[in-house]
Image (cartoon, rainbow, N blue to C red):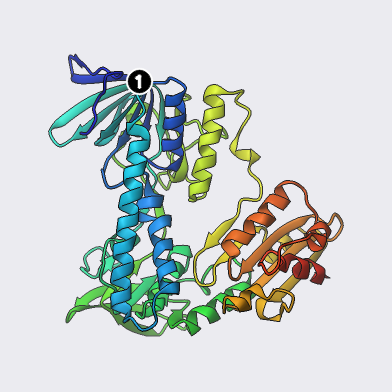
Amino acid sequence: MTDLADESMTVRTGDAGPELDVDLAVVGFGKGGKTLAATMARRGARVAMIEQSDQMYGGTCINIGCVPTKALVHDAENGAADVPGPDRYRRAAERTDALTTLLRGKNFAMLDTLDTVTVITGTAAFADPHTLVVRAGADTLRVTARTVVVNTGADPELPPLPGLRESERVVTSTQLLARTERPDELVVLGGGYVAVEFAAMHAAFGARVTLLARGPRILRAEDDDVVATAGEILTTAGVTVRTGATVTGIEDVDGAAVVHWTDAAGDRQTVRGDTVLAALGRRPHTAGLGLDAAGIKTDERGAVVVDEHLRTTQPHVYAIGDVNGGPQYTYVSLDDYRVVLDHLTGEGRRTTTDRRAVASALFMTPPLARVGLTEAEARATGRPLLVATRKVADMATVPRARIVHDPRGVMKAVVDAETDQILGVTMLSHDAHETINTVALAMRHGVTASEMRDEIYTHPSMTEAFNDLFANLRPV
């Protein structure tokens, strides 16, 4: 264990060994938990931050999620064309490792320098609703807390496919990020955000990539025309996309993995790769937490059951971030912190039901971002609609995309024809991950489609695409 106590935090010796009493114990160093720990400590609370690995200070995002993947995507897009792909990847991986090491240290210091925070590195499990037993090697510490926050995140899921766990060539996204050597032939299992992002990024570094998606199309939550455009972009980038692919088994043969699968017609197929990425979803990390001992319920996927205040079945225990089964976004975890903080120190009015127009972004190249409803979802409501669909290359008044040599993609807007309310916007375009926030803010504050159409935007920028997009709404 590290930093079991400082001068303000006294560890006493009880009948069961070393014991520590605190006001707040946070299990897991992720975004919401670390922010809550720091805020409560600055307000005078005694806080224990418990993290099972010294390689995860700061949480998933900066260590094995958002930051390293986006750093690699950036370097894939901007690397020197005359440098071979494997060398470019190695340099990018080394830069990414240095970046995550730096941020991990800053995150540790953010809490370690606060007088009333004790950072404990070890594995925690509930002994009763208020007591956590933390183990690190042969050492054990009992932490008793008035309030507990479970912030343990989620892990890559490996379903029971023959050979998936046995193959030496199969990796999760976490394991692939830890490597400095680029795969030559990468097979990606999955059709969601993680699968598409890794497929696009590795293809940009020169790997031969095959993506096997079980469903009839990739990115199943998006509209058909957006998915078709994304598929064209991936194919042009060198990714072989196979949909309707049911993987039946994986075996290691002659230094490679052979993935057996059947296509939509039921015909048997195989594809070889030196690396197979299983990007088949993530599961809340609750195993080993001893939730039963605390009387804390989980659902069928293992997610901690919470109410709109993020309280578990024990009202003094909260679950925030990916572990509660909500959207697995860092910024949602940060908003979870706001909800819990208001419940602990404020009026308790903030709830998860307050959230509106939460955007999402997939960092392929160009990125895909959306807020609100797709056209298909809006049609299902039965209300009269106006829809605009614009290819970026056809938007003559938006030169920014051509300036940066990337006029690929499509934009869509869905509007309520009677109220002029923006129901949703999808952007597959340069800077979509940034520009979508303008739409999200507008939707949260009731800005209409007409106002977005007539707004003044800087030039040349991608936000001025809204002048064009909202001017092309048509009834459907």
Q: Position of residue 402 (x, y in %)?
A: 62, 79
* In this rendering, position of residue 179 left or right of residue 347: left
* In this rendering, position of residue 371 left or right of residue 319: right
Quadrant of the rendered image containing residue 115: top left
**Front residue (pair 305, 465):** 465
Quadrant of the rendered image containing residue 18: top left
> What quarter of the picture does the C terminus occupy?
bottom right
Quadrant of the rendered image containing residue 384: bottom right
Does residue 475 appear in this view? no
* In this rendering, position of residue 89 left or right of residue 39: left
Residue 116 sits above or below residue 57 on the image: above
Task: Say few, some or many: other residues with alpha carbon within 10 Å of mark 1 (under 14 / 14 to 19 / 20 or more).
Answer: many
Residue in view at x 52 percent, y 74 percent: 216
Does residue 427 appear in this view? yes
Residue in view at x 81 percent, y 69 percent: 471
* In this rendering, position of residue 467 left or right of residue 15: right
Residue 287 sits above or below residue 217 on the image: above
Q: Position of residue 196 (x, y in %)?
A: 46, 70
Residue 436 sits above or below residue 326 on the image: below
Q: Amino acid at mark 1?
A: Val
**Front residue (pair 229, 170):** 229
Residue in view at x 31 percent, y 42 percent: 287
Label 1 sits on a secondary structure element that is strand
Residue 347 sits above or below residue 438 on the image: above
Q: Position of residue 285 (x, y in %)?
A: 36, 45
Which residue is disc 1 drawn over?
A: 22
Q: Position of residue 140 (x, y in %)?
A: 18, 28
